[in-house]
Image (spheres, rainbow, N blue to C red):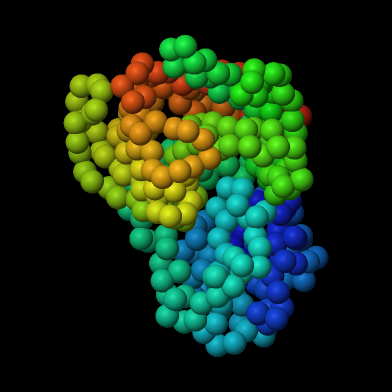
Amino acid sequence: MVTALDEEAAIGSVVRAISRELVHAVIVVDNGSRDGTAAGAQAAGATVIQEPQRGYGAACSPAAHGGARAGQAPLLAGEFIYFNHRGGPSMTKLGRSTTIRFLVFAMLVLAATSWAQTRPPIAEQIAKTYGLDSFGQIEAIRYTFNLDLGALKLSHAWVWEPKADRVSYEGKDKAGKPVQATYVRAQLSSQPAVVQDEVDPAFVNDQYWLIFPFHVVWDEGADVQDLGRHKLPLGKGSARRVVVKYGSEGGYAPGDTWELYVGADHRVEEFIYHGGGSGLQKRPSVLIATWAGYKKAGPLLISTDHRGTADGKPMRVFFSHVSVKLVGSDTWVNAQ
């Protein structure tokens, strides 16, 4: 069973990639898509069930199973394969090993269907505050990531098309030479070394800074804990401390921990980042920064200004030229 939301660009290849030696049928639960996800799934040979109530738990609910039975899909009793995609880019990376790893029987199905309930409510509240429910309306996001770390100053200009997971980059490589690149992340292995080793890791870093509140619910490898109110690490007063910790897989890099200090409006006010094991890029052991300069880019809420310290050194990360393009429109909507 594949749960999908606004995955027109990827759903066909995902359905076709699932070996029929392992399953009798592929069921796609369309979780309220606004694009051609359902049609693409059917064209690839899947049975499509409509589940208008958003969320992984609803998509994998007994009601959805009942829809599968009503559709007369030849499933074995109690045997499902679950794949989840909640708006992030990972669906395009599905492989045979992933298919095998997610084969589960009835007892494990119960654990999978309760996935959404294992995270505290604050996780989804934060993500929705930043526009999670409207992310399917986004055709493209354009932004420039800027870093000021004393002598080190960086600027990366990006256009990201989430549905196709297509990235366009303009900036410099580590040697300071200008680089322009456009690539689909599912085909990264076919790209030049500078794209694989420098551009794409930079994209992951910059995108996590831009929309980390979505990753709190997108990243299945994250353990999210609501630890109640704590003193702010930089400013005065207190906020709700929500800790997002990654294990051996997932996130920007394995072992990372993000401590979010969340206000009553479910906006992040400050955060502490603890770098875990080896990752895509060299990163600080401890980074403490504000989340400020809030702007709306279409339906998305973006924090454009982060000031603090990285391993004790003054640091600022800020975003400029932020805009979004909505599905069906050729107009860029500037953040303001």
Question: Is residue 266 at least partly visible in the picture?
Answer: no
Q: Is residue 285 found left or right of 237 in the rendered image?
A: right
Q: Quadrant of residue 101?
A: bottom right
The spot of residue 263 in percent (x, y) is 30, 33
Q: How many marks?
A: 0
Image vertical order of residue 200 relative to residue 110, above or below: above
Furthest toward the right, the residue is 43
> Percent from the top left, x then y, of residue 249?
47, 54
Front residue of 31/173: it is 173
The single residue placed furthest to the top in the displayed view is 151
Q: What's the residue at 23%, 28% (across, down)? A: 232
Residue at the spot 51% in from the left edge and 31% down from the top edge: 210
Q: Quadrant of the C terminus?
A: top right
Where is residue 120 drawn, in percent x and y? 32, 53
Residue 209 visible in the snapshot: yes
Residue, x 31% and y 44% (percent of image)? 243
Q: Quadrant of residue 136?
A: top right
